[in-house]
Amino acid sequence: MHKDCVYKVLIKRSVCSASLDIKSFFGFESTVEKIAMKQYTANIKRGKEIIEYYLSELISEGVTEIPRWTPPLQPPLSSDPYTIAAPTSTELHTASSSDISLGADKLDADYIERFLGQLTPIQESCLIQLRAWLQQTHRGKIPKDEHILRFLRARDFNLEKARDMLCQSLSWRKEFQVDTILNSWMPPSCLQEYYAGGWHHQDSEGRPLYILRLGQMDTKGLVKALGEEALLRHVLSINEEGQKRCEENTKIFGRPITSWTCLVDLEGLNMRHLWRPGVKALLRIIEVVEANYPETLGRLLIVRAPRVFPVLWTLVSPFINENTRQKFLVYSGSNYLGSGGLVDYIQSEIIPDFLGGDCLCEVPEGGQVPKSYYQTEVELENADHIRLWTDTIYQSAQVFKGAPHEVMIEVVEESSVITWDFDILRGDIVFNIFHSKRTPLRKDTSTALPELNNVQLIDRSWTLGVDYSMVESPLTFREGESIQGSHITRWPGLYILQWKAYGSAPSRVDDVISSLPGSAHTSKLMYYTELLASHDFRGSMTSLESCHSGFSQLSGGTTSSSQSHGSSFISR
């Protein structure tokens, strides 16, 4: 093929890839055409440069002919949840009405500038791919683009690492109901009075500003009075509030505000702050925050750092991500005053009065926690055994080869609705529903393994089709998927929900249990089930959606009723 023909063919491909969907409406055709032509011209120029480069490469290699291009066959959809595909235009997640997609592989430039900030084409592509994967596996329960982007940035836009980190965080949020913490968590009076931290206006770039007077805080007294769990819960509520304030400031300033600034005053810090249980609590808090709130800290300003500070820094710095450590600025003595100090990051009129500014700061001053607040060692131990959010609605279970996990639900009247919501944390799972008029003999017997979170109810002597029946065809779900669904019962009786390891063959339970240590054939899931009476159902598929599974703080929208219908089982 002649060089000029090759050039024309490649130009034609470039033109096709640069097509725009222009909609004429209400007399704005000319404006839209100008915008489109500007974008079109830029694409052509970029395409021409790329074409000329590769033409030169081909000529240098002695290539004189290129076969005519034909469109490839559309490959079947992969059942592997880790196969990332580009979303369709109707699937593109929108965090705002301003989020207008130009196609499955591109976001509107104004939307990026308004809500996301600077993104390279590769970074934009990573965001779209990860969002598409989440839409396939999490059935509409996906966070906003801003939140997904934090995890991508935390892992330097490594898709696999960012996906794993984000999925673990979403499961953690779901299990401990973090979305409701701003409404459900009320700090004890001891925290309100002696926790020396609070929000204070915003910095010069519009980021929310949080002030922590750590040097004035009696960390030992707070741990003895409240325990680790209350302190951790309080810190999580602060982080949730920070995300909420970032969204509000984004609307106020008209540009993306995705992180906040923290000002830490260390005046008064001494060796009592290095009390071992207090440091242990601090390290645990850092670990949880680093795993679930990446890239939310824009800058950390540490002022009045005393001589003991290097000791504390040596203890905690290994637990802080390198990207986060780079955002730390430390001032000793009075170096924070004047040029190069706080005024470079915070407007002078909002510098707190206790740091020499003119702004009255309402952050509590801290002080010694009275010993009357202290709990006994037994009380603290019991509180820590309860751990965070003991009222979580989710249960965890392990599924072994040959030893499925089963849950029994007793249905009194027909047309009742069984709903479920489960996440597969590890391994692949086959999900099934059975109906039986017999009571399982193995319930609460030695075959139930509560210490292993594994319960088996269907007796091996039962015959399928005689003692129990399958009410729906089994469905296979992959690791990382999040599933919601429902089943409208046709008969009263006992229904058994079963999660079985994918590809497992019948085997003796004793053999399975003996092989558990170090076994690679263990799956894990987190689930919630509920039975709705028929008179509560009222025929609405929308009512079957689990109200506990949406991420109210993070998601731009909830699953539609049609999606709920698609993920439901209806007995016929």
Image (cartoon, rainbow, N blue to C red):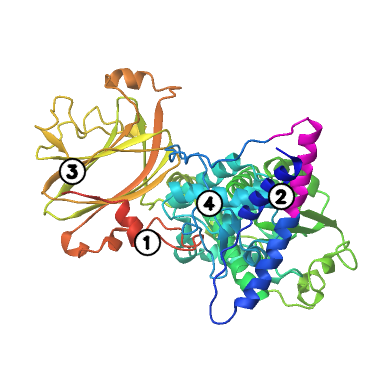
- Quick check: 116 above or below 85? below
Q: Are marks 1 and 4 in contact (CB under 8 Å)?
A: no
Residue named by callout 4: 131
SS state under label 1: loop
Q: CA distance from mark 4 to mark 2?
A: 24 Å
Residue named by callout 3: 495
Residue named by callout 2: 324
* Residue 510 rendering spot, x and y as whole percentages: 29, 19
Q: CA distance from mark 3 to mark 1?
A: 27 Å
- The residue nearer to you, when weighing 429 against 184, is 429
Q: Earlier in the sequence, mark 1 or mark 4?
A: 4
Secondary structure of the magenta portion, mostly? Answer: helix
Q: Which residues are magenta?
A: 46-65
Q: Quadrant of the N terminus?
A: top right
- The residue nearer to you, when weighing 144 against 175, is 144
Residue drawn 78% across the image and 43% down it? 53
52 magenta-colored: yes
Left or right: 397 with respect to 166?
Answer: left
Residue named by callout 1: 560
Within 10 Å of disc 4 (Cα), the crowding (few <14, some 14-19, many 20+) is many
